[in-house]
Image: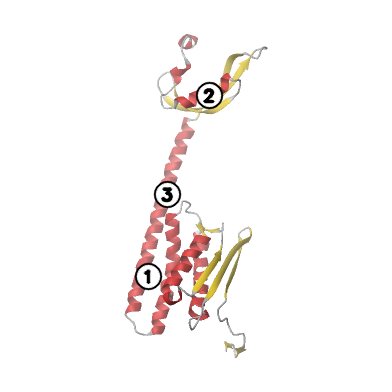
Amino acid sequence: SKEEITGVKPNVLQSGSTADGEYRKMWTTILTGNVWEGELFNKKKNGTKYWEKIKITPVVDINDRITNFIAIKDDITENKLNDEQLKMALKEKEIMLKEIHHRVKNNLQIVISLLNLQASSVDDPKLKSQLTISQNRVRSMALIHQLLYRSHDLSSIGMEDYLYSLSGQLLSAYGDLKDRISIKIKAADIYFNIQNAVPFGLLVNELITNSLKHGFPEGNKGTIHIDLSKTGEGQYSLKYSDNGIGIPYTIVNGHLS
């Protein structure tokens, strides 16, 4: 009522939770004849604190002197509470998803360890090689979950970082080639979700493995090039090459010779 506000300063509505600097900005704006818009955490006359969205417009006379202020206010407390609850729910889901990716990665690491134990107990070089290949395939999937666990964005994985990490893992698996083979990668600003990253990782894993196993025999040195680019909406081009010994083109009875 008029009696309640006569002679009372506007700070009677302050909650004590809004920084003084915010109020200074508001008064500086409206006292210089400008419109101020913002959100404040104020209180009602009964002491209840609430969020309000405010637009304050100065009113001037014919001499451009400010005579009054018109304030339009909306109580946005419920919206703020809903936003906070939504943020908390998203945070909880993010923590849960990170935990899931962490556990999946750990379970895949157990599979890798079991394959490693199996490989160490066999003498057949061919079987040992196949077990190593299987380990690398599982590692390519575990790496995706590891990158997602560390990422700020759980919906996508940067392919450039992934390809560098994957190629580094494979070079380490073929230790005798590490100092002879270099891998050049171009995949800047390319991001895949986990549904696309897993099969893509397995595909590139097979390509690199094939090059390392067969492309550089007898101490040959060389380079592998991987170029991933976006060609359209949801479309990508992968160009893979190495300067190893290559594949013979003569085919006899359906077999390479």
Q: How is the image coloured?
A: secondary structure
Q: Which residue is mark 3?
A: 93
Across and down, in percent, residue 181 comes to: 50, 74
Q: Nearer the viewer, mark 1 or mark 2?
A: 2
Q: Which residue is mark 1?
A: 112
Q: Nearer the viewer, mark 3 or mark 1?
A: 1
Q: Nearer the viewer, mark 2 or mark 3?
A: 2
How many numbered markers are drawn?
3
Q: Quadrant of residue 49?
A: top left
Give the farthest residue toward the bottom: 253
Judge whether 21 appears above or below 172 on screen.
Answer: above
Disc on the earlier residue, 2 or 3: 2
Q: Few, some or many C-alpha atoms within 10 Å of disc 2 (few <14, some 14-19, many ≥20)?
A: some
Residue type of the residue flagged with mark 3? Lys
Q: Quadrant of residue 175?
A: bottom left
Disc on the earlier residue, 1 or 2: 2
- What residue is shown at x 49% (from left), y 71% (from top)? 205
Residue 141 left/right relative to 116: right
Judge whether 192 appears above or below 255 on screen.
Answer: above
Across and down, in percent, residue 37 comes to: 56, 27
Q: CA distance from mark 1 to mark 2?
A: 61 Å
Disc on the earlier residue, 3 or 1: 3
**Image quarter in which the C terminus is found:** bottom right
Q: CA distance from mark 2 to mark 3?
A: 38 Å
Q: Few, some or many C-alpha atoms within 10 Å of disc 1 (few <14, some 14-19, many ≥20)?
A: many
Across and down, in percent, residue 65 comes to: 62, 13
Residue type of the residue flagged with mark 1? Ile
Q: Which residue is mark 2?
A: 26
Give the farthest residue toward the right: 62
